[in-house]
Image: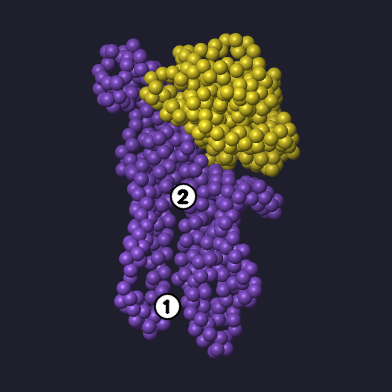
Chain colours: A purple, B yellow
Amino acid sequence: MKENDSNPNWQSLANESGSSLIEKAMEKFVFLISLTTILFVLLIFVFIARESLPIFLGTVERSIVREPIPVNALTTTPPEELMAYLDLSADEFQSMEKETLELLLEVKLEELAQAPIGTDATIQTTRWRYLLLPFQWSGYDAPAFIWQPISQIRKYNIVPLLIGSLKTSLIALLFAVPIAIGAAIYVSQLAPMRIREWIKPMIEMMAGIPSVVLGFFALIVMATTLQETFGYQSRLNALVAGIALGLAVIPVIFSIAEDALTSVPQSFSHAALALGSSRWQTASSVVLPAALPGIFAAVVLGFGRAIGETMIVLMATGNASIVSWSLLDSTRTITATIAAELAETVFGGEHYRILFVLGTILFGVTFLANLVGDVVIHRLKRRLEGKIA
Amino acid sequence: MSRQSNINTVIKGLFMIILVLLTKPLVLNGETITVKGSDTLVILAQKWAEAYMLEHPDAKIQVTGGGSGTGFAALQNQTTDLANASRRIKPSESAACIRAFRKRPTEIKVCLDGLTVYLNQSNPIDELSLGDLKRIFTGKATNWKEFGGLDAPITVYSRENSSGTYEFFKRKVLHERDFAANIQSMPGTAAVVQAVTKDRYGIGYGGAAYSTTAKAIRISRSDESPAYAPNEANVRNQTYPIWRYLFIYVNPDQDRDAITDYLRWIQSDVGQRIVTEVGYFPLPSENAEKIQLTIHPTQ
């Protein structure tokens, strides 16, 4: 901004004053802390990506249909074949006694006896076409997007979950953005000092409500009230969850938007008021446009909060994995799926890896949203400063 | 069982957990028995532990939930002594245990559970057949009219797919067919019952110990056969069609006297009386003699 340009010496003054040793040490310490944060984010991403990599590369291989080896054939079967059949490493195989191997063979036979039979049994269901495209499984009337990870034929189509996450987040934003930004404009521009001192902390206190409490409120109170008012079928649906999610998003959007509006230089509004515009005209046509980049950032961060929220959607969406854009149908989000299913998956198994793929997608979506937000903010900022036409 | 005493049980259970967690560092002398697993069994397991510790002041029993699969995983890692389960162990889980400690875990039947199907109190329907349930839960039937009820769409409530009850229902009633995609998954039986209580056209299922505010209906094996209510007599003589055993699994190498005593006590009359108090059903008396509590694999 212009004010900074008129006072070019402040930074050089600070440098010349000669900082003490303690100050330098503190500086390095703070730098290291910020470096660790970046490192942690990186490590988390590497971990999630590593767990989901076999799915992305399509290297999860499995053959359900196997020729069974009877228990009494233990001594006549070559060790390599046994190791592959029982999925043992050479070391494990060496360390096991005959009785243990017999037990393992016995259990394997039981497993094969329970294995699915039929046309779908040989399908590698973790391939991308089964994850993303509809498929007509045996027993279904039409090709469909099916998420049924606990099933004889495990069906991992992620489209219903993607739609669920997007649907609830968008409802949350539709509900929260007008309220939060309206409140931000009122508090920062129009409200008298006394009222402002009340409203601002009250809205910001909403951020302190634990999401499990909001979820419970949605499950017990909102779901029933909304159903009685509108008379639709599913008591728990995307609308109920979206509104509850909106309550969690409002304080996020409000406080950033309010900051952005307050940080518009007073000279802008003073000039507008001096030229005879009303307070509302000043707020809506001078201050609001100037603060747009900050407000856009608020909405993007609100979206990140909404799509990453777990407890509210777990409790209030009804968790039905269906492909539907109707607001009044139940829905199942990515986050709720991971939270509900991860604890019971086999460590390193297919289901486990698919859930990590979902985690990677979630990470990617929030990262992209933040990136787009950042780029747009910079462009808008430069335009407001008159650097590009 | 009244709602109040249910809540009391939960509160007592929570209090116990906190107490046990607080005292844990003091009692690591090998006499602590850790129990982990099925959420269906957790209330009963806590009651058992509470009563047993009153009788045997030197015994320390620590109970946690988390789901049947969690219990098996802990058994395999040898981080728990006993694993509660609302379903039989899977071959893959057996194999993991054999790899970890070279033995099959021993299965011990501890009580019976009648899986109850719940409707809203205002629903005029009082009984359904297994075939009807299969049609409803796979999404083939979508209107109560088909079963002589009101002309209204059916809202189906189920459990999350990590639940042992979900898998049991799927095997026993759906014969391994997929649940319909539009069923709503609730995080726990209490949530299912709560949803059906509020939803006039809802249907859900869950353990017998939760039947308080929703209507438990009678179930028949087929349209021609008589329907039975999920009460103690019908479950114990197995005329009620959707019943199951609840299990405790134990590592046969962990053959400590404290554990054996505790398991014997659970199957004794005292232990089985607590089963009735909590709302599940005691083991059939003719069965109780057959179940020998040798801590060695039966197969």
Image mark 1: chain? A
Q: Quadrant of residue A65?
A: top left
Closer to the eye: label 1 or 2: 1
- At label 1, which amino acid type do we have? Leu
Residue at image mark 2: A162
Asked if B45 appears above or below A302 in the picture, the reply is above
Say which of B96 and A243 sits in front. B96
Image coordinates for residue A287, horizontal then vertical, percent = 51, 78
Q: Secondary structure at mark 2?
A: helix
Image coordinates for residue A32, horizontal then vertical, percent = 34, 58
Residue at image mark 1: A384
Compare marks 1 and 2 and give the one earlier in the sequence.
2
Residue A22 lies left or right of residue B246; in this view the side is left
Residue B273 lies left or right of residue A285; in this view the side is right
Marks 1 and 2 on same chain: yes
* Residue B28 appears in the rendering: yes
Q: Residue at x 38, y 25 (%)?
A: B100
Q: Residue at x 43, y 51 (%)?
A: A362
Q: Residue at x 53, y 53 (%)?
A: A168
Image mark 2: chain? A
- At label 2, which amino acid type do we have? Leu
